[in-house]
Image (cartoon, rainbow, N blue to C red):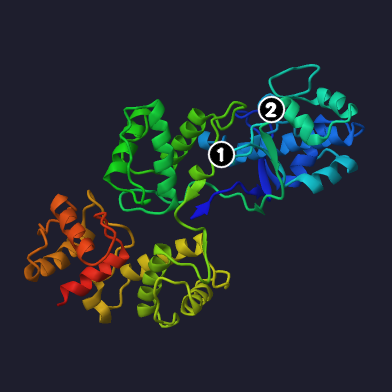
Amino acid sequence: MAVRYPIVPNMITVHLGKPDEAVRNITIPFTDYISNVASSELYPTWPVSALTANIYAIISFAMNRIYNEWYRSKGYSFDITSSSAYDQAYTENRSTYENINNIVEDSFNNYVVKNGQIQPYFTRYCDGRKTTCNGLSQWGSVSLANQGKGALDILKYYYGNDISIKYNAPVGDNTSGFPGYDVGLGSAGNPVLAIQRDLRRIRQNYPAIPDITDTYGIYNEETRSAVLKFQEIFNLPVTGTVDKATWYKIKYIYTSVKKLSDLYSEGLSESEATFLYEDELNYGDTGIEVEHIHYFLDAIAFLDSDIPRLPTNSIYNDNSMMMVKAFQEKYGLPVTGIFTYQDWKVMKEVYNSLLRTFNPNYQNYIDELYPDYFLVRGTSGDDVLRFQRFLLLICKYDKSIPGVRVNGIFDELTEQSVKKLQKDYGFEINGIVGPLLWRKVVELSKR
């Protein structure tokens, strides 16, 4: 399982004005942004502990905006504004102070967290003279520093004793939460788990949204019903599919009901940020993700001689590395042998492209290929029809299977037959058809 800890971004996109003001966006290094804000809001003559405490607050505030996609979830194309009325004071092209730059260089990947929570804390602050607020007072921090208090003690004075500093956080590219494709019936993985988690919490405030009991990370009819009601409540097109607009509306409402961008936040725990699917698969990894990758690589290798077709199982082993490296080299990806989210997206595109341009010499096999998404109760179409035909062949010799109506609709009878096959052949009994069960059904149908 993978915990989605916050990543300190390499870059940040700043809107040079108030949110709705018609001004430019600029994308700059995160460290340059922090140095600029600190040099705009602080005095370089202040004690080091006061400067450090304030810089931690500036970093945490900016990271909270980015991690919660506060502006992007509202439809904007930036991470933060330059307006101190909304965010922090950023002045384009201003000079910065050397001692402040040095503190930023040492501190840029440290941020404030509340104990038991993982999101960067919303470190609200004000200058303490012209304006006051619930949060850190910049001038007040100077008085505390002059009393001999260190940076963490100053922060605890304003934000409570239940905070700490997350030191040496990982640094990387700032990636969007939206996966880049619409999520609907049959979709699977961490994007589905995120949707399901968020809707469960939103339901506490909007009880008309149906409950989601699924824990597999597969977009089933239950999840679709919850999405339909959410779209209805928030005046979105009622499609049951999570497109970019629905994704970010769910994100915005989730952040709002949990108050993730608030001093008094409900917070996000480690368990809530833990997902089933790893962001990267490497040598020695095991599990269903590995089996899925093996299935698709094997199918691609069957049609593409540049990819070696090697024996595989549920362990990411030497054969996995060889096939992944060949795939990465063929399709212009970094040749590492480590399977990443980017590799997964390209692999799905390649697989679907091969299905569309299937070699006529292999037409006898095209019906046997898995359709690239999970079949669940409620899905319909040609792929369900293909599966039901295989299932019908099994029913003819195995009378213990409940049966099937070959109608292209994954109905209750189809689900019952799937569950019986899962029980008989050692699969998890969930009524869901993934690549491994699909392959087993094709195999059984040939008896």
27 vs 229, nearest the viewer: 229
On the image, the x and y values in percent for residue 321 come to 51, 76
Q: Does 103 sit above or below residue 127?
A: below
Residue corresponding to mark 1:
69
On the image, the x and y values in percent for residue 376 come to 26, 53
205 vs 382, left or right, is right
Q: Residue at the right extreme?
A: 45
215 vs 54, nearest the viewer: 215
What is the quadrant of residue 299 in the picture? bottom left
On the image, the x and y values in percent for residue 141 come to 82, 26
Q: Which class describes the residues within 10 Å of circle 1: few (<14), some (14-19), or many (20+)?
A: many
Q: Does 432 sit above or below residue 366?
A: above
Q: Earlier in the sequence, mark 2 or mark 1?
A: 1
Identified at 20% across, 65% down, the residue is 424
What is the quadrant of residue 289 in the picture? bottom left
Q: Nearer the viewer, mark 2 or mark 1?
A: 2
Identified at 57% across, 50% down, the residue is 175
Identified at 41% across, 54% down, the residue is 189
Identified at 54% across, 47% down, the residue is 176
* Mark-to-mark CA distance, 2 and 1: 25 Å
316 vs 174, left or right, is left
307 vs 110, left or right, is left
What is the quadrant of residue 207 in the picture? top left
Q: Amino acid at mark 2?
A: Gly
Residue corresponding to mark 2:
160
Q: Amino acid at mark 1?
A: Glu
* Circle count: 2
52 vs 192, left or right, is right
Q: Which class describes the residues within 10 Å of circle 2: few (<14), some (14-19), or many (20+)?
A: few
Q: In the rendered image, is residue 140 in sight?
A: yes
On the image, the x and y values in percent for residue 313 come to 39, 74
